Amino acid sequence: MAKKVEVKDLLEAGVHFGHLTRKWNPNMAPYIYMERNGIHIINLYKTAAKIDEASEALKKIAASGRKILFVATKKQAKDIVAEKAKAANMPYITERWPGGMLTNFVTIRKAVKKMASIDRMKQDGTFNTLSKKERLAVDRLRAKLEKNLGSISDMSRLPAALFIVDTTREHIAVAEALKLKIPIFAMVDTNSDPRVIDYVIPSNDDASKSIESIMNIVSEAIIDGLAERKSGKDDDGDDEAGMAKKAKPARSSDSKKGKEVKKAKAEVPSTDEEDVKDMKEAKQPVRQKSKKEVLNEEE
């Protein structure tokens, strides 16, 4: 179970430091506590509450078996996000956001399949039949695809949600998610617009210590959700086995009832041949006599 967010820990990590007051977005006003030395200070009590809300939602998504795509291309965030996403077994983008990553997902999947086909060429020996120049070109293409799309090679369908660090920098990712109505979780600084984000985490998105602090909490929540899913599957398996065992006696009792019915039918006495003949005659309709037959009877 994920631990409760402590304001003291967030304060030590520098999560409360915003941008310069002249760079602020007025829509972030509800999350700003005060101004000090020309810098906005974020209200950490609201941040803690928002982290708890976002963590609970991410945990439910992970427990349902769906994927959460992490996006962070800035230098101070990419390594931290990649490490935490790997730990949670989730896809991530830490290089340049490929245009159409979500809205043109079919093309992106083709590029991923191209990477897999190159790997097959190397395994079956086809790669060695190419010329030196061609092999070099294929290796360069493979390295480029691995750098940009290697982290999403296991993502066979659109993610259930996005977790973004710095929505201003990743505005293309935000726009694509909005177009497809994919929920967005994000670390939002004082210079960003929180209105387009579904789960806002007001926080410093520039300091690596602040990013690591938030990512630790988020990744723990996702791992907990995955653990719940795994334990739930195990419980379902046990329940099915128990139900199967309980069902067996019911089937044997049904067969026993069937035998009793057959036995009862055997005990019913059979009718004699004469009785059967009388029953058949009784069922036949009475024939009306003709006029000629009636006159003959009178004579």
Image (cartoon, rainbow, N blue to C red):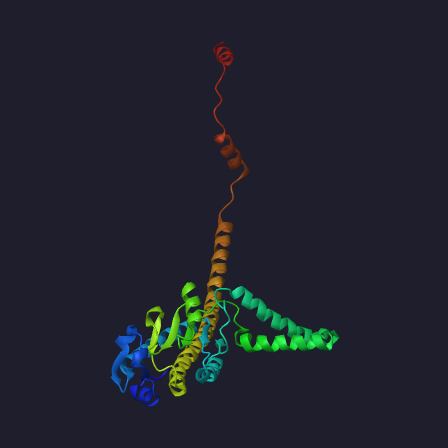
Label count reads: 0
Q: List x then y, in percent, for residue 4.
A: 32, 83
Residue 60 quadrant: bottom left
Res. 63 visible in picture: no
Quarter of the rendering occupied by the N terminus: bottom left
Q: List x then y, in percent, for residue 107.
A: 55, 65
Q: List x then y, in percent, for residue 41.
A: 28, 83
At x 50% / y 54%, what residue is drawn?
Answer: 263
Is 68 in front, or is 63?
68
Is 273 in front, or is 145?
145
Residue placed furthest toward the front: 22
Whether residue 262 sits left or right of residue 163 in the image: it is right
Q: List x then y, in percent, for residue 37.
A: 27, 87
Is 29 in front, or is 164?
29
Is 299 in front, or is 225?
225
Residue placed furthest toward the top: 299
Whether residue 31 sits left or right of residue 259 in the image: it is left
Residue placed furthest toward the left: 34
Residue 26 vertical placement versus 204 (above, below): above
Residue 220 vertical placement versus 249 (above, below): below
Residue 133 quadrant: bottom right
Res. 50 visible in picture: yes
